[in-house]
Image: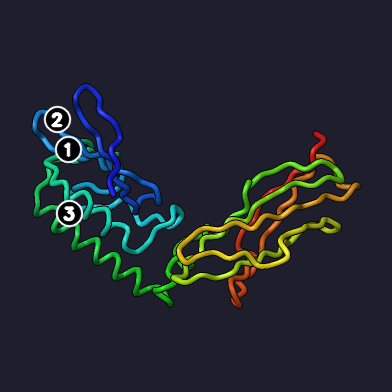
Amino acid sequence: MPLPVSTWRGTSFTATKTPGHTEYHCALRFEVDGRRIAYVGDTLARSMNGPRFGGPVFQNRYAPADFVESVTKIRDFEPEFLLTGHWGAQRVDSAFFDEALTRARSIEGIVNGLVAVPEEAGFALDPNWATVYPYQSTVAVGQAVDLEVRIVNHLSRPTRAAVELRLPPDWTSEGPAEATPIEGGATGSVRVRVTAPPYAKPGARHVISAAVTLGERRFGPVAEGIVRVAGF
C-alpha cells in the first residue's frame, strides 16, 4: 500500500515500495503544475532499446516478481514523466509501461526457469538469507560477546532454525536449547554468546561462521562474521 509522505509547498508526495534494484527501494509520486510525475530512482528508465531495469541485483535481495510489482505500481499512477537516478527526466506513455510490464514478466519467467525449486527461489537468489549481526564485533580477553544470526525463511511454511558456530580453537559459544521457530516468508534471529579464551591474543581478528539448519535440512556454514580481540 502506498504511504503518504508529506506536503511541501503545496505538493503532496506519496511513497510506494518498488523492489528490484534493492529490497527496500521506493518511488515517490506527486503532481506539479498539473503534471503527474514519478521519481523512480534506479528501478526503471527508458533507453534506446525500450524500458530498462536497475537489476536484477541479487546481492540486494531480488525476488523474481519484483519488477512486475514495481512497474505495476508506477503505471497505476499514470505518470507523464519519470525522474530517474541516472538518465534524468523522461517522458513516458501507456505504451512504454505495456512494454515494461511485458519485459518484467519475461525476466520473472527466465529467473524462475533457472531455479531448481521455484517455490524456494529465495534460497537460490538471496546470498544473504543468513547473516551474523553485527558483522564485526569486539570481545575482551576471557570475556563474552552477544551476537545474532538473522535468518530469512524463504519457505512458504513455518520451520525451525538451529545454528552451530564454527569458532577458533578453544573459543566457546552458547545458544538456545531448542531450535527457533520462524514463520514462512518471515525473518527470525538466533541469539548466541561467544566467549574468547583467557589467553586469546589481543588485537587478533577471527572469522567465525554459522552453520544453519532449517527443519531437517542442513545448509552448512552460510554466514560469517569477524570478532576482534580487544587490546590494541
The residue lying furthest to the right in this view is 199
Q: Position of residue 202 (x, y in %)?
A: 84, 40
Q: CA distance from mark 1 to mark 2?
A: 7 Å
Residue drawn at 83 percent across, 45 percent down: 143
| Closer to the camera in the image, 162 or 212 | 162
Q: Which residue is mark 1?
A: 37
Q: Which residue is mark 3?
A: 49
Disc 1 crowd, CA 10 A, few/some/many (<14, 14-19, 20+): many
| Gap between marks 3 and 2 measured at Cα | 29 Å
Tell which circle, 1 or 3, labels the residue nearer the N-terminal end.
1
| Residue 192 x/y as whole percent | 71, 55
The residue drawn where x is 74% and y is 41% is 138
Which residue is pictured at 11% across the width and 41% down the height? Answer: 80
Q: Is residue 53 left or right of residue 37?
A: right
Q: Mark 3 or mark 2: name the one nearer the start of the chain.
A: 2
Q: Secondary structure at mark 1?
A: strand
Above or below — where is 11 with respect to 146?
above
Q: Which mark is residue 32?
A: 2
Three-letter residue code for mark 3: Asn
The kind of residue on which mark 1 rests is: Ile
Gap between marks 1 and 3 measured at Cα:
22 Å
